[in-house]
Every structure is written in C-alpha cells, then in structure tokens.
Amino acid sequence: MMKIPTFRIVRPTDNPDALLPFYRDGLGLTVLDSFQDHDGFDAIIMGRENVPYHFAFTRTDKHQAGKAPTKENLLVFYLPDHAEWENAVERMKATGFVPVSAFNPYWDKKGVTFEDPDGYRIVLQQTDWAP
C-alpha cells in the first residue's frame, strides 16, 4: 500500500509567536514541532495529527520577511460540512479575528476570508472541492 506523502508549506515571518493565536487558536491547528537556531533559523511547525499537510513558519536574522506581497496569497480550506464550516468561522471570530472582503469576489460567495498578522489570508470555503 502506497503511503500518502506529507505536504509542507513553509513561509517566512518576522514574528512566529504573533501567528500562534491565528493558526492555533483560530484555525485549531496544533504545534507539532518547533526548533531554535537550526543553521540560523527558528521555526514553528503546525498542523493536525494524522493529516498529510502542515505549515512551517520560519524566522531568521539573515533577512526581514515583511508582509504578504498581495491580498491574493491564499490558503483555502474546503469544508463541505456546514456545521464544521460554521464552527470554524465562529472559532476565528471568537479568537478576535474579523472577516475581510476577498480580493477576488469568488471567495465571498461561499466562503469567509481572514487575514493573519503578516497579511496572508486564509479562506474557509463552505463547499467540496471538485475538479
């Protein structure tokens, strides 16, 4: 049986700790691992147990990460179950994050967009993904 590969998204940030409330408390991800000064880089790795994707937020003194380059830098979570989607949106709001209008109005039709402290956006999309 073929093992499903893990997909990691790595993104630089100037302040990984500022992202914790958004991704941990709001999105409900878990800190899976972290490290300090690995060849000059610090990181927080977040995801969910037994899910084949996770996010690594890295920081280094070698350069400044800055903010997201555009409002169209998105991570989209497709949540087909209405109750699960509604709970995810309410958890983000309860954590203090306010929805923002999507740059592309397509995402506002069935989704809600939130912006993290670095200006990157996630969309909680209330639908199945189908090609």
Image: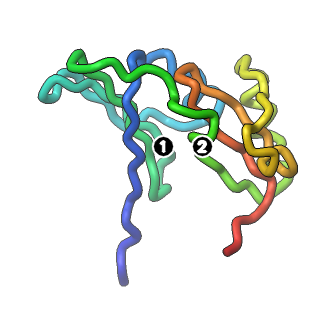
Q: How many labels does the image show?
A: 2
Question: Residue farthest to the left?
Answer: 39
Decide if residue 20 is in sight here. Answer: no
x 69%, y 43%: residue:
123
Q: Who's the residue at 36% across and 84% down the image?
A: 1
Color encoding of the figure: rainbow
Residue at 52% from the left image edge and 22% from the top image edge? 118
Q: Where is residue 69 in the image (x, y as percent from the top left)?
A: 51, 31
Find residue 74 and name its label. 2
Between 5 and 131, the residue placed more toward the observer is 131
Residue 36 found in image quarter: top left
Q: Is mark 2 on a helix, strand or loop?
A: strand
Q: What residue type is labelled 1?
A: Gly
Q: In which quarter of the image is the C terminus?
A: bottom right
10 vs 81, left or right, is left
Up-down: is 107 above or below 121? below
The residue that mark 1 highlights is 47
On residue 13, the disc is: none
Q: Is residue 99 visible?
A: yes
Q: Where is residue 130 in the image (x, y as percent from the top left)?
A: 70, 72
Of the residues shown, which amino acid type is indicated by label 2? Leu
Q: Do the residues labelled 2 and 1 touch (CB within 8 Å)?
A: no
| Camera-side mark, 2 or 1 | 2
